[in-house]
Image (cartoon, rainbow, N blue to C red):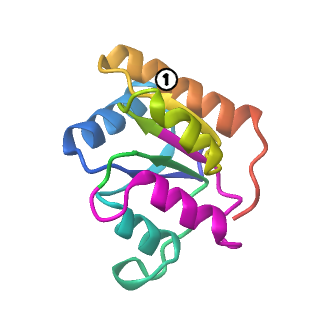
Amino acid sequence: MSGRSILLVEDNLGDVRLTREALREADVAVELTAVPDGEQALAFLRAEGEHAGAARPDLILLDLNLPKKNGLEVLDEIKRDPELRSTPVIMLTTSSSRDVAASYAAGVNCYVVKPLDLDDFTRLVQAINSFWFEVARLPPN
């Protein structure tokens, strides 16, 4: 589906490449923007600094373990901001299940553990695309 955009908040360049490759393999037509830490994520979402003029994404894929501000801190700021709170956030992480409850308590829309295999990751990306961009109804930006 064209015209859709995803913000990937991920500090691991290998995982950023894996996500881009999975999107290509899954033939998902979205604009993917990646930022490496929590502070950059919030600056992008608020269109501040070097991200001035950035369009708000339709969906946020947020890693839990990030430098500067971790995923839970970023999620908390997103959900407290009236301009951002309706943007769906998927916690996409390798982190253990002990973080699931904290993520949902902070308002995450979905918590997904990253598969390490490209084929499994491609299937996950297809499922995310299918649900969030074809089944679910997203708020307007």
Classify 36 as above or below 124.
Answer: below
**Count of marks overlaid on the render:** 1
Crowdedness of circle 1 by 10 Å Cα count: few (<14), some, many (20+)? some
Q: Quadrant of the N terminus?
A: top right
Q: Where is residue 3 in the image (x, y as percent from the top left)?
A: 60, 53
Q: Which residue is disc 1 drawn over?
A: 124
Q: Residue at image x 36%, y 15%? A: 119
Q: Can residue 84 be seen in this view?
A: no
Classify 109 as above or below 97.
Answer: below
Q: What stretch is highlighted in magenta?
A: 67-91
Q: Nearer the viewer, residue 115 or 118?
A: 115
Q: Position of residue 32 (x, y in %)?
A: 43, 50
Q: Can residue 106 be seen in this view?
A: yes
Q: Quadrant of residue 96?
A: top left
Q: Position of residue 101 (x, y in %)?
A: 58, 36
Q: Residue at image x 62%, y 41%? A: 104
Mark 1: which amino acid?
Answer: Leu
Q: Does the magenta stretch include residue 79?
A: yes
Q: In which quarter of the image is residue 19?
A: top left
